[in-house]
Image: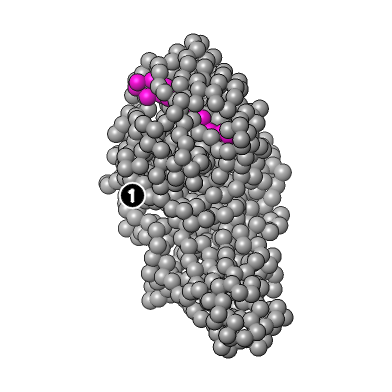
């Protein structure tokens, strides 16, 4: 239905029920490109660069697909400056800023915004004849913010009158700088702290160019040194370098990871990541897909699992809980033929049996060694892709609403590829529905998750537009306190914002609450709880939920005039092969913060629904905006429900 739905559709091969989640950041090694002061990203300058800067494709990107980061932060703002010259619009106030997020916020982590004003573009580019009457101001911010949540930072505003009084100002050189003093004795943290930038903006200017860092040509190969690593990962004890390489044989993203030089022991070449453990996790395993062009009985991989009580200990490898658990795997046991992928998996760690206390973080470590030349390295290479864990998220599928503002709400579905959902409500007297981006990480109670939100792309009743490039409407930050309660803030790029205290409207049959993970027995077709769509009319669709008192759902599409349309159904028991008629209701006239209350909904029409099995159905809609028939199918299965 939206870009996120197309991502789900691409994952439709995963329709077999699974208990696996890609909770790691960047488990499939997304493309990246490195930049230096002499070769900066399109539209930008890098100044006083101490290390590389990188643009990385990231599922958590703010405005599009990519994020920017400085590979190695320094202790001062004098290093690592990302800059651009933008033109000033006459008679307009001017301010600028950027969106930022980090997994490790700290008061000693800082952002500085700086601006200089010039008469001409040439002066701005060369930093000649800066206007000394105004500008060269520093706007400093401590990054003591929510972890992994995009946060907006902006400069003070320069009024049009002050700019005019300063005289002959036509260009501004805007500068973004990040520093790190969160390590020992005020030095940068070790391992490196990651800070991601996206969505640069400047009011009173048509710039900046390449604000979302989308103008990038990912190279065939990019290398990483000791202490750095692909986005989300940390490399330790490297013998030489590690690479991300574009490869036709890659399983995901068109890229693979590999160590340049394997040694004879597992003490070298470690690829690590700290992973938060969802509440209720009782065991952990690690898996990966591997491939080599030279299978050999002395080519091996080791999975090492270490457990910690908090993120800081995990990153610093302090106060480990229990012993490290190693699983050594002979490659030829899973990869017998050259050029073929094989899946390898660690032995399970059972928390209750193998650890003295319950951990909060797992440090995943993937290592490889080569003794193919009479016990010494033989120059062989192992390619890695799709590293994964078995960590299971809490069950959060259902209809959620704030009892203070009924008439609007969210439908969330925890799927085999992540959590996604829809918002339904109103704006300026018209209906509004939004698609929430996919969140494929671990859901930890009390920790916020941040996803993009996409607006409807357009169309009319029964004829939605191509949904491949939906506009980004804004962001949603959600903090789940339990399986049945959460807080959320929905914010548009246009400045609308609304906060919710959410409760679960109805439990889903087959998912036991409040345990969150155990299945409850049921004789009804609980597998019907899912997102459904007709591939011939992608861009509209259904969200059905099966509660203990029957099936209910929501339709998301467009009315006959081309406006967004959402419809809510009544609830009735259903049976496979039997037709059920559901009443459809809609509201008119609400606003973003004052929705039409449920009692004010009007009858739109009806939908006749016949489920031929738990993955396919026929729907005939008849109502105010016309008639249409859809052959719908499950987009992706709901996690935790027994597969049919």
Circle 1 sits on which residue? Answer: 446
- At a point 38% along the width and 76% down the height, the residue shown is 185
> Quick one: 209 or 604, which is closer to the camera?
604
User: Is residue 207 something one can see in this rendering?
Assistant: yes
User: Is residue 260 something one can see in this rendering?
Assistant: no
- At a point 42% along the width and 31% down the height, the residue shown is 601
Write down the region rendered in magenta: 546-558
Residue 462 screen position, x and y as percent? 62, 28
> Quick one: 271 or 3, which is closer to the camera?
3
Residue 326 screen position, x and y as percent? 43, 46
Residue 597 location, quadrant = top left
**Furthest residue to the top?**
578
Residue 526 location, quadrant = top left
> Does the magenta stretch mainly form a helix, a strand or a loop?
strand
> Quick one: 44 or 90, which is closer to the camera?
90
Residue 594 location, quadrant = top left
């Amino acid at each position: 239905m939206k870009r996120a739905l197309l991502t789900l559709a691409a994952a439709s091969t995963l329709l077999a029920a699974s208990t696996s989640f890609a909770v790691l950041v960047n488990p499939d090694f997304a493309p990246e490109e490195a930049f230096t002061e002499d070769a900066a990203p399109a539209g930008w300058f890098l100044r006083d660069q101490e290390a590389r800067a990188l643009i990385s494709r990231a599922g958590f990107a703010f405005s599009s697909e990519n994020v920017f980061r400085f590979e190695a932060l320094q202790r001062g703002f004098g290093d690592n400056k990302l800059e651009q010259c933008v033109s000033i619009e006459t008679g307009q106030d001017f301010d600028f800023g950027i969106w930022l997020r980090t997994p490790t916020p700290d008061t000693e982590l800082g952002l500085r915004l700086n601006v200089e004003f010039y008469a001409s573009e040439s002066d701005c580019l060369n930093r000649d004849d800066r206007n000394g009457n105004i500008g060269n101001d520093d706007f400093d911010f401590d990054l003591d913010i929510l972890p992994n949540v995009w946060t907006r930072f902006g400069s003070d505003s320069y009024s049009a009158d002050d700019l005019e009084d300063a005289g002959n100002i036509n260009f501004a050189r805007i500068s973004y700088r990040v520093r790190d003093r969160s390590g020992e004795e005020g030095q940068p943290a070790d391992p490196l702290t990651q800070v991601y930038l996206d969505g640069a903006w400047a009011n009173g200017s048509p710039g900046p160019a390449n604000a979302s860092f989308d103008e990038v040509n990912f190279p065939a190969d990019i290398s990483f040194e000791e202490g750095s690593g692909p986005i989300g990962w940390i490399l330790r004890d490297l013998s030489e370098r590690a690479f991300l390489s574009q490869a036709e044989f890659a399983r995901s993203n068109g890229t693979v990871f590999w160590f340049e030089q394997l040694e004879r022991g597992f003490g070298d070449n470690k690829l690590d990541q700290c992973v938060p453990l969802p509440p209720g996790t009782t065991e952990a395993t690690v898996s990966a897909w591997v491939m080599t062009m030279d299978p050999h009985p002395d080519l091996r991989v080791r999975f090492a699992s270490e457990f910690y009580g908090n993120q800081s200990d995990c990153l610093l490898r302090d106060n480990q809980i229990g012993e490290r658990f190693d699983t050594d795997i002979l490659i030829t046991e899973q990869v017998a033929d050259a050029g073929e992928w094989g899946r390898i998996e660690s032995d399970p760690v059972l928390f209750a049996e193998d650890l003295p206390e319950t951990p909060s973080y797992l440090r995943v470590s993937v290592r490889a060694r080569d003794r193919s030349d009479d016990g010494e390295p033989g120059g062989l290479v192992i390619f890695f892709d799709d590293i994964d864990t078995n960590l299971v998220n809490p069950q959060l599928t259902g209809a959620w609403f704030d009892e203070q503002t009924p008439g609007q709400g969210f439908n969330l579905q925890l799927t085999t590829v992540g959590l996604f959902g829809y918002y339904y409500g109103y704006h300026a007297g018209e209906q509004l529905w939004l698609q929430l981006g996919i969140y494929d990480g671990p859901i930890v109670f009390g920790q916020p998750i941040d996803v993009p939100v996409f607006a409807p792309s357009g169309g009319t009743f029964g004829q939605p537009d191509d949904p491949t490039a939906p506009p980004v409407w804004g962001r949603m930050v959600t903090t789940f306190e339990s399986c049945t309660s959460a807080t959320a803030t929905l914010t548009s790029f246009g400045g609308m914002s609304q906060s919710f205290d959410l409760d679960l409207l109805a439990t889903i049959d087959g998912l036991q609450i409040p345990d969150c993970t155990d299945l409850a027995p049921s004789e009804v077709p609980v597998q019907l709880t899912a997102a459904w769509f007709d591939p011939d009319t992608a861009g509209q669709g259904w969200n059905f939920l099966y509660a203990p008192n029957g099936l209910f759902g929501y339709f998301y599409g467009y009315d006959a005039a081309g406006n967004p349309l959402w419809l809510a159904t009544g609830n009735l028991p259903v049976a496979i092969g039997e037709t059920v008629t559901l009443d459809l209701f809609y509201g008119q006239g609400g606003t973003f913060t004052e929705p039409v209350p449920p009692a004010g909904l009007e009858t739109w029409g009806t939908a006749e629904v016949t489920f031929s099995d738990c993955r396919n159905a026929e729907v005939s809609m008849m109502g105010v905006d016309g008639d249409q028939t859809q052959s719908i199918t499950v987009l992706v299965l709901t996690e935790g429900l027994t597969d049919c």
